[in-house]
């Protein structure tokens, strides 16, 4: 296997009541799985800056109260191009609760929708699937 370089992704649990924003990916990585919005960490960015930039680029949404939640280390070996991602999971809320997501990158995503945490679509982005199976809860306690 041609050895690539591990890359860093930043994805966001954008929470709205008991719902989270997910979109079905159209991508060489995890194609057609339901994934959180987000993307590659760019040079010099903080995790929070990357989260806000990717959310704006992909959905047009402004986010608030962005905070670090957890991290995963995932090998995507079965993909057309084997890759290795360290994925930073952030949590955030809508800056304007009335703002609706737009699908600004239809070539990369089928569209963004709110899904109840207790009724998530399938298949999920593999690192997210593992977290859900292990009972991970991204919602604030209390
Ligand atoms: C696979 C994921 C953890 C990191 C890459 O995300 P992405 O393909 O959405 O990247 P971009 O949004 O930056 O295009
Ligand atoms: Mg992106
Ligand atoms: Mg990007
Ligand atoms: Mg992306």
Image (spheres, rainbow, N blue to C red):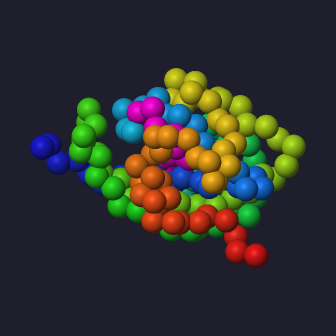
Is residue 87 in view from this perspective?
A: no
Compared to 13, does 115 lie above or below? above
Compared to 131, does 122 lie above or below? above
x and y percentages locating residue 39 in the rendered image: 50, 46
Compared to 16, does 98 lie above or below? above
Is residue 33 in view from this perspective?
A: yes
Name the outermost residue toward the left.
1
| Residue 37 counted in the magenta span | yes
Q: Which residues are magenta?
A: 31-42
Which quarter shows the N terminus? top left
Number of callouts: 0
Indicate the quadrant where residue 58 lies. Answer: top right
Left or right, residue 100 beside residue 76 = right
Which quarter shows the C terminus? bottom right
Name the outermost residue toward the bottom.
142
Residue under the point 28% across and 52% down: 75
Name the outermost residue toward the front.
119
Q: 115 or 38, which is in the foreground?
A: 115
x and y percentages locating residue 72 in the rendered image: 41, 62
x and y percentages locating residue 71 in the rendered image: 45, 65
Left or right, residue 32 beside residue 53 = left
Residue under the point 17% across and 48% down: 3
Residue under the point 64% across and 53% down: 117
x and y percentages locating residue 20 in the rendered image: 66, 50
Indicate the quadrant where residue 82 lies. Answer: top left
Name the outermost residue toward the top.
107
């Amino acid at each position: 296997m041609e050895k690539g370089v591990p890359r860093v992704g930043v994805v966001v649990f954008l929470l709205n009541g008991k719902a989270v924003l997910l979109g079905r990916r159209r991508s060489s990585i995890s194609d057609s799985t339901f994934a959180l919005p987000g993307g590659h960490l760019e040079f010099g960015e903080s995790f929070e800056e990357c989260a806000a930039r990717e959310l704006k680029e992909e959905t047009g949404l402004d986010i608030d109260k962005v905070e670090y939640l957890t991290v995963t280390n995932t090998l995507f070996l079965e993909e057309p191009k084997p890759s290795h991602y360290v994925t930073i999971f952030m949590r955030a809320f809508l800056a304007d609760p009335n703002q609706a997501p737009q699908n600004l990158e239809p070539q990369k995503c089928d569209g963004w929708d709110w899904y109840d945490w207790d009724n998530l679509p399938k298949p999920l982005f593999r690192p997210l699937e593992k977290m859900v199976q292990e009972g991970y809860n991204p919602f604030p306690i209390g």
